[in-house]
Image (spheres, helix red, strand yellow):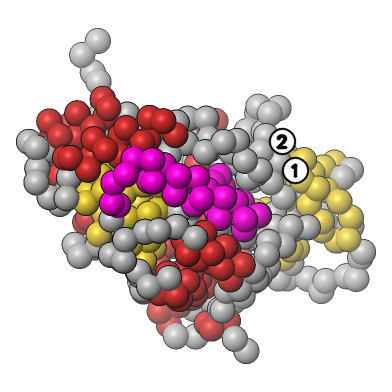
């Protein structure tokens, strides 16, 4: 007893000597094009290798920012894009998003607040977790300059007012619960006030803060643009019933990306649905629009390179798994685009076959059914690039069973899959 130490779960990703001359060959900072294949040839990694594409991340952010600005300017109010930091807090990723023009961050914990404030003194932080600790609220306001807080209950409102000493400059955003929708990840169960409660809360916060907002989240990887329009309509009903003017309508995150066999409607369709929903409401001219994308901004910007340790029929034992960066490939059943990398041998013209993966830990639950499509002659020692892993990948790693090492490099080739509506200038031939 008495030895209470707090420590983080995972050894940080090892950035392979970004300062050394060798690594400049695979780093964007050299100004030269570099690819995942070159990085594999150089490092022959036996540990999982995270390949960050800063150019793609910056292009993705700037595409999204332009699309949202266009949609919100069309309804004459303007908007802010808040990056949901939980999706990927890797500093190289954050710097790339910043380079793409992103300035607002949806933060949910003291750790995220500290990280973003340290990296970007000028960033605007929005504390979008509806259930916060008292000390966390106090520090966010007094130490880190956070002014916007989300809430979905009276208790949380009282807590925020107490811990900020009844500050006169708060932005308070009420999170509205949505009926169960059709997103791949439904988020309706955990947070959000029911309609009648949201009406009451809106009136309460209007009396307490100079800036008042309403927010919702349609669920992650939402493939149906009309879900945003329906949610905005519902929000409109809450606002009308409350009879208060609002300053912010926050349409949340959930914007989808491509996965094998899944091509979402183009980004513009989502923006058009949002604009249609807003137009139908009678919002004050000064009301700003926010959104909180996570996955859409970062998924395409990071690939994971794994090595095949053993092949058993159509099962591949690889060096990363559900306790590493491939959590979503486990029970959630996500499939990722896969490409065989064999830098030291001539590639054969073997046809593709379907494979499942086992991760490196001794837990039989460390299994990924895929199917992942790879050339039929894939064998131990081969490397595989798995794409679209910038979102909810590296940040979910654990140190379970001692498999906590991974390295990170920066590359500038194109991602394995494109998502419609994004312009990736850095990859243009
Ligand atoms: C996770 C989360 C997001 C991001 O969701 P994506 O589906 O990754 O876009 C946005 N807002 C809140 C409140 C979240 O919890």
* Helix, strand or loop status at disc 1: strand
Q: CA distance from mark 2 to mark 1?
A: 6 Å
Residue sitting at 36 percent across and 36 percent down?
A: 199
User: Seen in the image, is 421 located left or right of residue 205?
Assistant: right
Snapshot quadrant of residue 385: bottom right
Q: Name the residue tied to disc 1.
A: 357
Q: Name the residue tied to disc 2.
A: 367
Q: Position of residue 338 (x, y in %)?
A: 73, 59
Residue sitting at 19 percent across and 62 percent down?
A: 121
Queried on whether the Cβ of the residue with tag 1 lies below 8 angstroms from ligand 1, the answer reads no
Q: Nearer the viewer, residue 348 or 6?
A: 6
Q: Are marks 2 and 1 in contact (CB under 8 Å)?
A: yes
What number is the disc on residue 371? none
Queried on whether the Cβ of the residue with tag 2 lies below 8 angstroms from ligand 1, the answer reads no
**Quadrant where the C terminus lies?**
bottom right
User: Seen in the image, is 322 located left or right of residue 274?
Assistant: right
Residue range of the region highlighted in magenta in the rendering: 217-246
């Amino acid at each position: 007893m008495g030895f209470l130490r707090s420590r983080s779960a995972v050894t940080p990703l090892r950035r392979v000597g970004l300062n050394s001359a060798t690594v400049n060959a695979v780093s964007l900072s050299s100004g030269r094009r570099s690819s995942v294949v070159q990085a594999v040839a150089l490092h022959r990694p036996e540990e999982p290798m995270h390949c960050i594409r800063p150019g793609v991340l910056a292009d993705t952010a700037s595409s999204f920012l332009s699309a949202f600005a266009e949609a919100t300017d069309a309804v004459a109010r303007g908007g802010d894009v808040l990056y949901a930091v939980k999706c990927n807090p890797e500093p190289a990723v954050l710097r790339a998003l910043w380079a793409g023009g992103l300035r607002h961050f949806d933060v949910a914990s003291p750790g995220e607040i500290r990280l973003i404030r340290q990296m970007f003194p000028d960033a605007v932080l929005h504390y979008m977790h509806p259930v916060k600790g008292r000390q966390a609220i106090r520090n966010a306001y007094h130490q880190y300059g956070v002014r916007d807080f989300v809430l979905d209950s009276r208790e949380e409102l009282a807590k925020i007012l107490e811990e900020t000493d009844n500050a006169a400059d708060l932005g308070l955003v009420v999170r509205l619960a949505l009926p169960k929708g059709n997103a791949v990840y439904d988020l309706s169960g955990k947070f959000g006030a029911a309609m009648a409660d949201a009406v009451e809360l809106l009136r309460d916060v209007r009396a307490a803060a100079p800036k008042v907002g309403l927010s919702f989240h349609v669920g992650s990887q939402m493939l149906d643009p009309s879900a945003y329009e329906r949610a905005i309509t519902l929000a409109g009903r809450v606002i009308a019933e409350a009879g208060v003017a609002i300053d912010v309508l926050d349409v949340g995150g959930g914007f989808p990306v491509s996965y094998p066999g899944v091509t979402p409607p183009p980004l513009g369709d989502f923006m058009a649905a949002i604009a249609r929903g807003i137009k139908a409401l009678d919002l004050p001219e000064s009301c700003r629009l926010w959104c909180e994308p996570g996955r859409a901004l970062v998924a395409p910007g990071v690939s994971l390179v794994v090595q095949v340790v053993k092949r058993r029929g159509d099962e591949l034992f690889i060096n990363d798994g559900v306790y590493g960066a491939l959590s979503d490939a486990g029970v959630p059943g996500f499939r990722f685009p896969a490409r065989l990398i064999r830098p030291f041998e001539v590639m054969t013209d073997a046809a593709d076959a379907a494979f499942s993966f086992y991760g490196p830990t001794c837990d039989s639950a460390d299994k990924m059914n895929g199917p992942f499509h790879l050339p039929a002659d894939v064998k131990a020692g081969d490397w595989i690039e798995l794409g679209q892993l910038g979102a909810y990948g590296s940040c979910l790693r654990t140190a379970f069973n001692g498999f906590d090492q991974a390295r990170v490099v920066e590359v500038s080739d194109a991602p394995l899959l494109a998502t419609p509506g994004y312009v990736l200038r850095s990859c243009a031939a």
